[in-house]
Each structure stands twice: as C-alpha cells, then as structure tokens.
Amino acid sequence: WLNNQRNQKKKGKLDGSLEKRLVDVGVVWDINSELWEKKYCLLVNFQQREGHLIIPQKQIEDGVNLGVWLTQQRRKKKMGKLDSSCKRRLDEIGFVWTFSPHYI
C-alpha cells in the first residue's frame, strides 16, 4: 500500500491531505536516499571517532557493513552511476576513491 502511495506522489497524483497525514506519521518518501544518508552519517561518525576514513572491508557500524557500502560507492562512481551530490559530499569529507589493499 505504501509503495503505491509513493508512486502516486512521484506522479503528482497523491491527494494533498493524505500526503500531509503520511508526512505527519513520518513516512519516508525516498527510501534509497534515506538509506544513503544513514550510511553517510555512519561514515562521518566513524571519521570523527577514529580520525580517518580508512575503512576495513568488514567494518560494521550500527549493524551496517560500512566497508561494503563504500566499495559500492566506488563502483558506482567508476560506472558513472553515483549521484553527483553523493560524490560531492564524499569528496568534502576526504573520502579516498582509489582503493588500495594497504587501507585495510
């Protein structure tokens, strides 16, 4: 049901009062963006705590495998599929795009 409401919103066909009620109860409209943001925040927290962004492949933060997520971000960038705002935000915190085994 909720996915249908999300699709209706994307198409501009969701009733305004229903949209407001859904927002009021905390509905997340773009799940992928929400997940990316959560993982990005985990990365920033790691950097603040450890003082660097050299993330081991198996690094788990708050139940999320941060190392795997970062590998996915590198792959998306290489394939030209990483959203430019995501790339910019990772660049701003000094993320290392070129993977090297000595980072692990």
Image: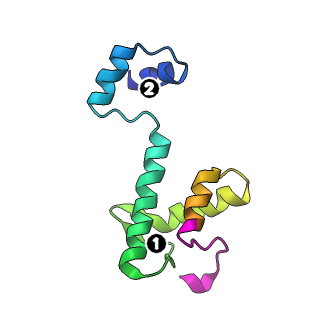
Q: Please state which of residues 79 and 57 is positioned toward the viewer in this rendering.
A: 79
State the image coordinates of residue 50 (x, y, percent, origin top left). Answer: 39, 81
User: Which of marks 1 and 2 precedes in the sequence?
Assistant: 2
User: What amino acid does circle 2 point to?
Assistant: Asn
The chief SS type of the magenta part is: loop
15 or 66: which is nearer to us? 15
Q: Is residue 83 left or right of residue 25?
A: right
- Mark 2 lies on a secondary structure that is helix
Q: Position of residue 3 (x, y in %)?
A: 44, 26
What's drawn in magenta, residue-wise? 92-104
The quadrant in which residue 87 appears is: bottom right
Look at the picture and state if 86 lies above or below 91.
Answer: above
Q: Which residue is mark 1?
A: 58
Can residue 72 be seen here? The reply is no
| Residue 100 in magenta stretch | yes
Secondary structure beneath disc 1? loop
Q: Nearer the viewer, residue 60 or 42?
A: 42
Residue plotted at (57% across, 55% down): 86
What coloring was used for the rendering? rainbow
Q: Is residue 101 above or below residue 5?
A: below
> Label 1 sits on what residue type?
Lys
User: Which tag is nearer the camera, tag 2 or tag 1?
Assistant: 2
